[in-house]
Image (tube, rainbow, N blue to C red):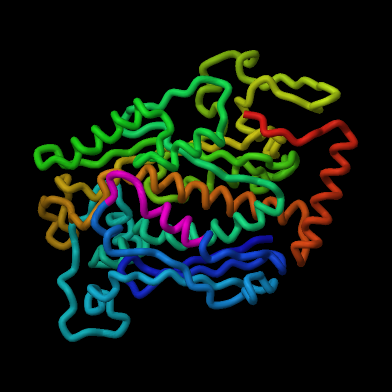
Amino acid sequence: MLRFLTGGESHGPSLSAIIEGLPANLPIDLDAINKQLKRRQGGYGRGARQQIESDTVEILSGVRYGRTMGGPITLLVRNRDWENWRERMSIAPVENPDPPVTRPRPGHADFAGMLKYHSNDLRTILERSSARNTAALVALGAICRALLEVAGIEVLSHVVAIGGIHARFTPPIDYHAIAARAEESPVRCADPVAEAQMIAAIDKCMQEESRDTLGGIFEVVAINCPPGLGSFVHWDRKLDSRLTAAVMSIQAIKGVEIGMGFGVAEVPGSKVHDELFFERSAGFLRGTNNAGGIEGGMTNGEPVVVRAAMKPLSTLPTPLASVDMQTHQPVKAHFERSDVCAVPAAATIGEAMVALTLADALLEKFGGDSVEEFQYNLNGYLDAIRARGWQPHHAC
C-alpha cells in the first residue's frame, strides 16, 4: 500500500526520498517535518557534522497548497558539507582522485561491502551506509505522522539506557509525561538521576585518555492504535514482524523487542500474559501490557511498545585493529568524524520507522484514495468494534 525509497550519500549533494500511496488531501506541514529533522540532529554526545548541517526539507512533487495530491511525494534534504567534498565525491571522473581508503572499521559495513561490491575504496561503501542517510527516513516518517494524526495515533520515544546506565520508572507509566520530560533532556532520558549519570559517562568517553563510543536502548511507543492493524495469516503481514524489521534496519541497531521482549523467557505464563477484563463504562481493559500492544501479529488496542538496542558506534576516536585491504598488513582502522553517543538521535529515527510502518498498516486496513475516504472507512470500523464493547482509552 505504501512504498518509499531513499537515495543519496553522506557527503553527496543531497539526500532524497520518494513516497507513494498516501491518500489525497492529507495536510502537510513543512515546519513539522523540519522539527523532526532538527530532533534527529540533537542529543548530547553528537559530533562535529551536526554543527555543519542544519537540515530542512524541500518538497519537489506530490503536494499542492499544503495538501497531498495522491501521487508520489518527492523530498530533498541538501547536504551543506557537499561544498567541502565536491572533488572527493565528484560525479564526473577527475584527473587526480583521492587515494583509496583501505582500512575497514570493525563493526561497520566497510569490510563486507568492499568484498561484496568489488571495491578497492571503502569510501564507496561508507557514504551510503552512513547514518547521515537516516535524515531522509525521518522526513518520510514526519510525512506519515500526518496520516497517523488523522487516525488519532501518537508516536513518542525516550531513552531508557546509555552505556549500561538504566532509567527507572514507577508504574503506572504515563507515556505522555515521560516523552515531555525526555524532550527537555540532553540525552532524551526522563529519569533525572540516570540522565546525570549518562551525561557523565559520555563526558568520560570524550576525554583524550579514554576516547570511546557508547550505545544504549531507546523505547518507541505508539498510543491509540485501533485493534486489528496487521494480521496473523502470513509471516510478512504480522505487525510485530514488520515493526522489528523496520527498527532493526536503522544503522547500529542490534536488537529489537516488543513489550516485555526477552523477559518473557524468564517467568511463567501467568506472569506474562495480559489478563482481559470488561467494565460497562470503560469496555475491555488489561491489567498489564507485557505484550506491548500486539498479540498474534495484530494490535490489540493497548500502546504499542518497541524497544531497540543500539551498539556503540564503530567509528572510534581511538581506532581498533584492522587489516589494510590492499597490502593485508595490520593497521589501525579508518577514522572519520563520529559521534560519541547517538542513542538520543536514534530514538527519533525509531519514531520515524514506527510511523512509516503504522501508516502502511493503516492504509492496508482502511485504504482510501482520499483522506476523507480513509476517515470514513476508519470510522465505520471503529463504530463496528464499539458495538461489540470496545472503547478507546490511553492505557499505559
Viewer-closest of 282 and 357 = 282
Question: Residue at 63% across / 49% down in the picture?
Answer: 358
82 falls in the magenta region = no
Question: Residue at 49% across / 37% down in the picture?
Answer: 219
**Image check: 392 left or right of 332?**
right
Q: Main secondary structure of the magenta part?
A: helix
Question: Residue at 53% across / 77% down in the picture?
Answer: 60
Viewer-closest of 30 and 22 = 30
283 w.r.t. 98: above or below: above
Q: Can residue 86 be seen in this view?
A: yes
* Quadrant of the drawing holding the N terminus: bottom right
Q: Position of residue 90 (x, y in %)?
A: 28, 80
40 falls in the magenta region = yes
In magenta, the rendered stretch is: 33-46
Viewer-closest of 255 and 75 = 75
Viewer-closest of 106 and 15 = 15
10 w.r.t. 340: above or below: below
Q: Where is residue 198 in the image (x, y as percent from the top left)?
A: 30, 33
Image quadrant in which you'd find residue 206: top left
251 w.r.t. 77: above or below: above
**Image check: 11 left or right of 70?**
left
Image quadrant in which you'd find residue 359: bottom right
